[in-house]
Image (cartoon, coloured by chain):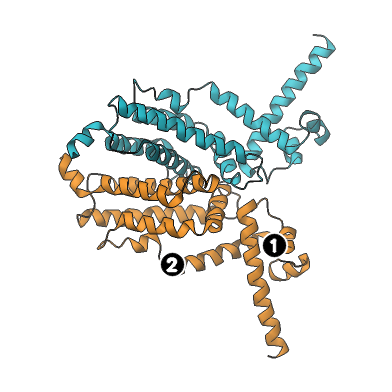
Chain colours: A orange, B cyan
Amino acid sequence: MSDERRTRANGRASRKAILVAAAEVFAERGYRGTSLTEVANRVGMTQPGLLHHFKTKDELLLAVVEDYEALSERTPSLQERLAPDRFELAEQLELLASTNARARQEQLLLTTLSAEAIPLNHPLHGYFLHRYKSFRRGLTAIFVRAQESGAMRSDVNAADVARELIATLDGLHLQWLLDPKEVNLKKAVRDYARRLTAELSPTNERARS
Amino acid sequence: MSDERRTRANGRASRKAILVAAAEVFAERGYRGTSLTEVANRVGMTQPGLLHHFKTKDELLLAVVEDYEALSERTPSLQERLAPDRFELAEQLELLASTNARARQEQLLLTTLSAEAIPLNHPLHGYFLHRYKSFRRGLTAIFVRAQESGAMRSDVNAADVARELIATLDGLHLQWLLDPKEVNLKKAVRDYARRLTAELSPTNERARS
């Protein structure tokens, strides 16, 4: 390997190591509680060494979020899994919980940063605003199509169900993260998914009408 | 008023002013993002002046939480409102949402601090762990009694419903705090409360069995 190529390879390795350490620190301490010094220490680097890769804490935070997004794109989202021709809501929610239960740190990162990002001046405020808006719209569209195809009862409001489903998942993740001894994420989501599916069943609608 | 009494009255007034300013700063920036200097500035006090009342940031945080608890005790909690002899779940959830929608800053404080308190080393970790545990247990007990009295269908698990209700409320509060233009807390909770009540109705159980 030429010196130049070796330098570039080392650069990529350090960049990756910084991103891994930064994701840990941001998850544990949030954006506001994180200092570049702490990230540099964790990765065994000097602060000038870190500043060579990321000039500011904001730049580092956005790189961590991009890295997370790139990773997420490799696994299908709930919206993608819930194709209207196979509307397996309970099964797909259980799969999601099973994946998330194995990724505690990523879930901690999301929960910590989304709450911290409520104030307008937080660097991720716009990101989370858009993320929730688009999640609500995407799920609503899927529910509307499921209602049209007869897979979901049509006497409930699709947008309400979408908003509540996202809310319940968020809240169950928070309870699990705070108290994993008492709240088992997979079981909690499975119990919820089964009740929700029973409620949304078209049979249920016919039985009542 | 004697000099000594005046000093004590001024002391109480400054203490109260510090607590109000601190609750604002903790709500906006969390515990980790808050500095005593910022709180002192907001209340128009020097830092030594503030340190006269609260020696550390932890002491100030705990005083803010105690203050919040004292305030909360003056209004009945959801558990207290849901007496088993009048199990008006939808009405009481709507009342709660209506109160919370008028107290954005308090809700921001709770949402921000509860997410920040997930790591074991956060000063409020034990507080929120206990708060959620006791909320889950209290609601479960109320649901069990409502099932026994025939006010709620008995073919659902009371503990699951309690956990999910708390989760959904938390998640709806988060979406409202992040995006008050798109998510109306009162409407979101009302829609949820009505669907939940319909689902939990004993009539619904008889119709299916």
Where residue A115 sits in the image (x, y, percent)?
Answer: 55, 47
Q: Which residue is mark 1?
A: A56
Q: Is residue B98 left or right of residue A181?
A: left
**Would you say residue B70 is visible in this rendering?**
yes
For image coordinates 29% across by 30% down, the residue present is B152
Q: Which image quarter: residue A15?
A: bottom right
Q: Earlier in the sequence, mark 1 or mark 2?
A: 1
Which amino acid, by three-letter code, is at mark 1?
Answer: Thr
| Chain ID of residue with mark 1 | A
Q: Residue at x 29, y 58 (%)?
A: A88
Q: Amino acid at mark 2?
A: Thr
Q: Secondary structure at mark 1?
A: loop
Instruction: Give the side of residue A10 with respect to residue B52, left or right.
Output: left
- Marks 1,2: beta carbons within 8 A: no
Judged by depth in the image, the label closer to the viewer, 1 or 2, is 2
User: Please, which residue is most extreme toward the bottom here?
Assistant: A2
Q: Residue at x 31, y 27 (%)?
A: B148
Count residues near mark 1 (Cα–Cα under 10 Å), then give few for <14, some for 14-19, many for 20+: few
Q: Quadrant of residue B158?
A: top left
Taking the image as shown, residue B69 lies to the left or right of residue B139, namely right
The quarter of the image holding the N terminus of chain A is bottom right
Q: Against B82, is A144 above or below? A: below
When the figure is inspected, residue A13 is found, relative to residue B156, above or below; the finding is below
Q: Label 2 marks which chain's residue?
A: A
Q: Is residue B113 above or below residue A16?
A: above
Q: Residue at x 48, y 22 (%)?
A: B76
Marks counted in the figure total 2
The residue under label 2 is: A75
